[in-house]
Image (cartoon, rainbow, N blue to C red):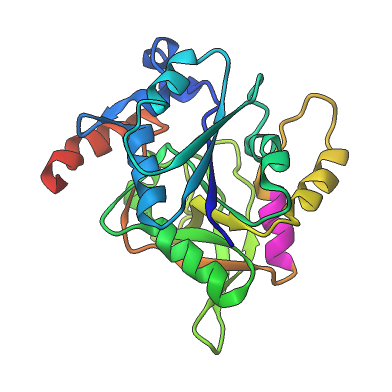
Amino acid sequence: MLDTAIIPCGGLGTRLHPITRWLPKEMLPVGLVPVLYWTLDEAAGAGLQRVIVITNPHKPVLEAAARQYQGALELEFVPQEHPRGLGDAFMRARDQLGGAPFAALLPDNLFGGGNPTVDVLDAHRRTGLSAVLLAEISREHAGTKGATGKARMRREPDGTLRVTDVAGKGGRGRFDTAGEDLAVTPIGRFVFTGDVFDEFDDVARGLPAGAELDDVPVLQRLARRGALAGALSAARFYDVGVPEGYREAVAAWPARA
């Protein structure tokens, strides 16, 4: 039974300096509520029961604040002493998962309207595959999103989506639609089958010493062999991990409260 989510909070929020030198980005307020609490609410609203929060010893206020969360979730905390990529954050929870499938929710991705975790869970349940949330990003709004890779997808006869390829993140620091008016990209809601850790192991073996273990190479592997489902999000997506996206979310949130 899929009842567990990972929320990775080990990063240092360098894109939001100087404010994140004193306050973790997961604690930044949106609608007078810490970003992390919105993500925990989303996990609970999707029917998940257990959340493994990946923490960083340099951010003790984060764990202290998370323990004050009042929702009906069982919280566990696993340290990531050094932020060495999203894949590395997932690997920290490997023993706690015991081979079970899990959801992953990135707290610096917030959504207005609906519950996108429900959508990605549904894509997994309908296909039995790992799944990722997808967003259509316009060229106009690309500057408010972090550096993610474009995705290609196809619709299957049963109506489900398959992601067929995912581009690398590139080096511009913001999403690049590659000249298109509208492009699709994976965003921070995932479901992975339990054997995904074998994929991360294999990718890690090919990395140079000190390199980060990112999620994109594993998404690419799954996509290219037809093992990655997609769920196209209808919700408005805010990347609060970059200054432009955070300001956009703060400005918009009261209107939706």
Number of disc labels: 0
74 and 45: which one is in front?
74
Q: Position of residue 187 (x, y in %)?
A: 48, 51
Q: Residue at x 41, y 49 (%)?
A: 43
Q: Which residues are magenta?
A: 217-224
Q: Position of residue 30 (x, y in %)?
A: 25, 33
Q: Is 223 contained in the magenta span?
A: yes
The answer to whether residue 186 is above or below residue 70 is below
Q: In the rendered image, is residue 254 in sight?
A: yes
Q: Identify the residue at the far right of this view.
A: 205
Q: Is 13 contained in the magenta span?
A: no
Q: Would you identify the image quadrant in which residue 70 lies?
A: top left
Left or right: residue 214 versus residue 26 is: right
Left or right: residue 58 versus residue 181 is: right
Q: Residue at x 63, y 54 (%)?
A: 167
Q: In the rendered image, is residue 238 in sight?
A: no
Q: Identify the residue at the far left of this view.
A: 255
Q: Position of residue 180 (x, y in %)?
A: 44, 60
The answer to whether residue 46 is above or below residue 17 is below
Q: Position of residue 139 (x, y in %)?
A: 37, 52
220 and 97: which one is in front?
97
